[in-house]
């Protein structure tokens, strides 16, 4: 037993252990950050979302808009939670370049 206690820790063993610990710590962080990202979408009320365009500004021409299965189907938004209409509008509008 005295042999085990006095055994020196090699640099290789130390680096392997450190790499293992750091990789174990990264997994929960990435999982939590995905959940946090999903929870950061704003409500339609907070973004003053409406189902009609504001002049020429609408969801289809916004960079935040993610289209639905068809051109007329509701899509989603990177900022506003829930389904949004292609011709909708909100204050988070950012034109596609």
Image (tube, grey):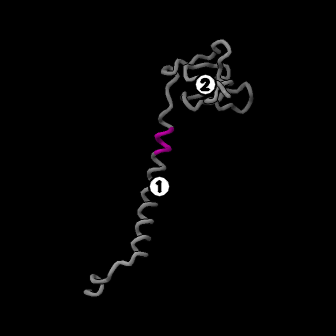
Look at the magenta stretch and give its main secondary structure: helix
Q: Where is residue 18 in the image (x, y as percent from the top left)?
A: 41, 66
The residue lying toward the viewer, choosing from 39 and 90, is 90
Left or right? Give the position of 33 relative to 63.
left
* Residue 63: quadrant of the picture: top right
Residue at (65% x, 29% y) in the render: 75
The residue lying toward the viewer, choosing from 42 and 97, is 97
Q: Where is residue 3 in the image (x, y as percent from the top left)?
A: 29, 87
Residue at (51% x, 21% y) in the render: 47
Q: Which residue lies furthest to the top in this view?
A: 55
* Residue 9: quadrant of the picture: bottom left
Q: Where is residue 69 in the image (x, y as percent from the top left)?
A: 72, 33
Q: Residue furthest right?
A: 71
Local SS, label 2: loop
Left or right? Give the position of 7 relative to 91.
left
Which residues make up the magenta segment?
33-37
Whole-angstrom CA distance, mark 2 to mark 1, is: 33 Å
Q: Quick check: is 34 in the magenta stretch? A: yes
| In the rendered image, the vertical position of residue 37 relative to residue 93, given as above or below | below
Of discs 2 and 1, which sits in the foreground?
Answer: 2
Specify the label residue 78 is tagged with. Answer: none
Mark 2 or mark 1: whose residue is earlier in sequence: 1
Marker count (numbered): 2
The residue beneath circle 1 is 27
Residue at (61% x, 30% y) in the render: 64
The residue beneath circle 2 is 94
């Amino acid at each position: 037993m005295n042999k085990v206690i006095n055994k020196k820790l090699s640099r290789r063993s130390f680096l392997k252990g450190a790499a293992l610990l750091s990789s174990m710590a990264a997994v929960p962080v990435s999982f939590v950050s995905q959940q946090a990202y999903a929870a950061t979408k704003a409500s339609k009320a907070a973004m003053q979302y409406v189902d009609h365009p504001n002049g020429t500004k609408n969801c289809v021409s916004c960079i935040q808009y993610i289209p639905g299965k068809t051109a007329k189907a509701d899509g989603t938004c990177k900022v506003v939670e829930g389904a949004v209409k292609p011709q909708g509008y909100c204050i988070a509008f950012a034109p596609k370049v």
